[in-house]
Amino acid sequence: MPAVKPKLLVLELWGLGDLVIATPFLRAAAEKFNVTLLAKPFAEELRPRFWPEVTVVPFVAPWTAFHGKYQLWRWPWRELFRVRRRLAAEHFAGGISARWDPRDHALMRLIGVRERYGIPRVQSTIFLTHPLPRPNVLAHHYDHWRAAGQALGLKLPEREKIIPPARPPTRQVLLHSGARLPARVWPLENFKIIADRLRQKNIAVQIACDPDQLIWWQSQGETVSCPRSVTELLALIDSAGAFLGNCSGPGHLAAICGAPTFTVYGPSLHEWFRPLHPASEIYEGKACPYKPCADYCRLTAPACLHNVTADEVWPRAEQFVEKHLE
């Protein structure tokens, strides 16, 4: 009989891009462990395509909300205890989080995971059996997963050596104007200018957006897609030869699917979250003394993005598209 794989609990409770970055780790871990992933519900839509051997337990952690995350009286305590009981019954041999987050560490302890790996912060070593050294302050988030993999005996490629899947050639660009955080959205007028200029060069442009942007795009006479699920977003990505957008989950998803990406960065650091594609390119926004920001901009508007014009970005975007849509 084949050897039974030890059970491993993996925590990635945040956004779509964060989970996509964990894909190489999850694939490698599934070869050695019986992996259960605790993540937001959209992980179930990613699982069949990217890591089919992983079991997903959907959970929206209340501390990942943008507003009122520590209003404890509003937390879904019944759901939290239900998930905790379900996972505790699995008797995990190991658990790991690549995020520098004491809440992950405490949750692993409450679940009763035997061997707990994580990067300690604010004395969270008390919850860990295997505290991991924190990577360089400018290390990409993937490098955190790579270090976590090394602790488990997994060999993950360096970020620059990740090989994207092959894609059929197409002269269509997917331009996605949305982002999880409003502070990461380049003004829509700029995206419209870029789309018009690409079409003038006989390049097909499919525009996708977030629900709150749909009316604006329609007012510009555009027929746009507004994907309401990861499955719908994947269908758009699969028909495109390249991706243009903000620092966002859709950009990370496009990269892991093999599409070269061009990202306009503002408050976040590309050193931390550049998409996992060797041909990914970035346009760095304006300097700001508060950069990098977390969930909110301290100014009335994110000047790092709003002060970047379409004329500044266009030469780089044009060169990027011409390179990848031959």
Image: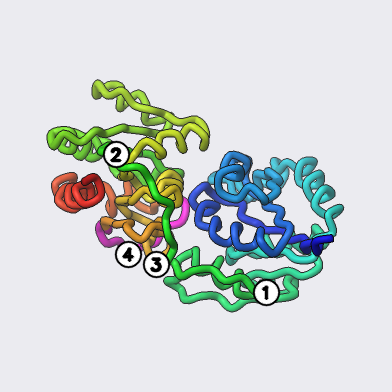
State the residue in front, 61 or 207. Answer: 207
Residue drawn at x 51%, y 37% is 230
Picture quadrant where residue 98 is located: bottom right
Vertical placement of residue 186 versus 138, above or below: above
- Prevalent SS, magenta region: loop
Magenta stretch: includes residue 26: no
Between disc 2 and disc 3, the foreground one is 2
> According to the image, label 4 marks what residue?
289
Residue 170 tag number: 2
Between disc 1 and disc 4, the foreground one is 1
> According to the image, label 3 marks what residue?
160
Range shown magenta: 284-295
Amino acid, disc 4: Pro
- Mark pair 1, 4: CA separation: 29 Å
The disc, 3 or 4, on the residue closer to the chain's N-terminal end is 3
For label 3, the SS is helix
Amino acid, disc 1: Gln
Between disc 1 and disc 2, the foreground one is 2
- Mark pair 1, 2: CA separation: 51 Å
The disc, 1 or 4, on the residue closer to the chain's N-terminal end is 1
